[in-house]
Amino acid sequence: MQVPAPRKGFNLKLYYFVYFTILAAFLPYLPLYLREHGVREIQIGSLMAIGPLVTIVAQPFWGMISDYLQNQVKVLRFTLTLGMLTMLLFTVSTKLWWLTVVMAVYMFFQSPNVPLADSIALGYLKSSGEGFGRVRLWGSLGFSVAVLAMGQFFSVAGLGYLFAVTALLFLLSLLATSGLPQGDAAPRRKLGREAWGLLANRSFLVFVTFTCLVQITFSAYNTFFSLYFTSLGGATNLLGTAWMLSAISEIPFFHYGEVLLRRYGPANLLRFAAIVFGARWVIYPLLTSPGAVLAAQLLQGLSFGLFYLAAVHYASTLSPRELLTTGQSLFAAITFGIGSTLGSFVGGILVQYLGLNGLFWSLAVIAFTAVGFFTLAHSGAAGE
């Protein structure tokens, strides 16, 4: 039986809400778990970089598989199932080599889940008339609720439950895929050469280079924020509040995103978001208390919220219909694969030798350099 259109829209929002609880449980608390088990900062950075490194290969692979099969939902269910099973392997050993292997396998199946959902949403929303931001904000809402709850839970139960809780959330996400819309199928084609041909498009190449540079800074922040916050005296339960505030701040920008995109265009929003990122990285080294950090977290919406919204739309406009998922996957592979890999790895080195404050000053330089590059290069790119 065909699922009614309003129900499909609800199911999309439900999936985003539930899936982002996985990220809320795993991302903020894994570095703390690793430090509890004697892993040093530079090793934490290297370990966190393994996942995004795998993403560089995994994103285009799953994107092309999805576009060839013309069934994003089926691929999404498969990757969610394998991600859930792989999560349980983290409990086998805390040796660094084992964690590295499991992280690589886990990210191979976990990394395509957001780009797949984004392509499903973009395909469905073209006919529904609802803006992408108003669907995607449910992911931020799910992250906000879950990260606060996880902070309270782990402060009482301990971080030993991290992987079991995350596996359970994977199961709930798998159940939430029931009734997801499946876009109209384009003719099945051999897409490998055409997919990589996207990178020959100067506009696309300039775009992903810029987003990669910005993501380097955001990835380093994500990897070491929990350590930074606790170094200022922030407790584990308050850490959940800090992550929650950042996610909550994204919601208004996702909600009104279509209005902002129509008025200013994705290129201008991308530039503005990168400037705000740079300002954030300047502010954090100047803060001396957990309370001040909580206030600074509200800049997340102006930075990542606008950045992600504009980037997804821009990647979609640069990708032909038959390569919609592949375009999103290549964008994600370069931005969240290469960018996140470099951010985690280089961030670990910077923290080891310059400290946490030195890390943030370095990230500010990278963010403002990205703005300069995009401003100069984008003006000459095709499609401006």
Image: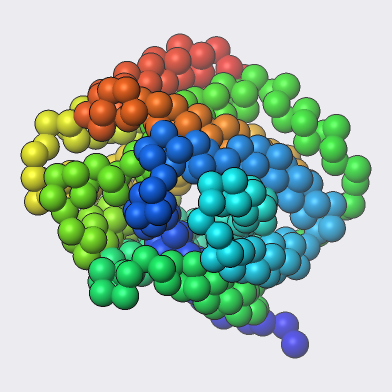
- Residue 362 lies left or right of residue 289; in this view the side is right
- Foreground residue among 293 and 227: 227
Residue 341 image offset from top left, x and y in percent: 53, 35
Residue 222 image offset from top left, x and y in percent: 37, 44
- Foreground residue among 160 and 207: 160
Q: Which quarter shows the N terminus? A: bottom right
Residue displayed at 85% across by 32% down = 193
Task: Decide if residue 73 is in sight here.
Answer: no
Q: Which quarter shows the C terminus? A: top right
Q: Residue furthest bottom?
A: 1
Q: What colour scheme does the image use? A: rainbow
Residue displayed at 74% across by 50% down = 62
The vertical placement of 350 against 24, above or below, is: above
Picture quadrant of residue 262: top left
Picture quadrant of residue 79: bottom right
Task: Decide if residue 44 is in sight here.
Answer: yes
Residue 184 image offset from top left, x and y in percent: 76, 62
- Residue 267 lies left or right of residue 242; in this view the side is right
Residue displayed at 91% across by 43% down = 190
- Residue 16 lies left or right of residue 287; in this view the side is right
Residue 382 image offset from top left, x and y in percent: 62, 19
- Total tally of numbered discs in the picture: 0
Residue displayed at 46% across by 19% down = 374
- Foreground residue among 244 and 266: 244
- Residue 45 lies left or right of residue 58; in this view the side is left
Picture quadrant of residue 138: bottom left
- Foreground residue among 83 and 160: 160
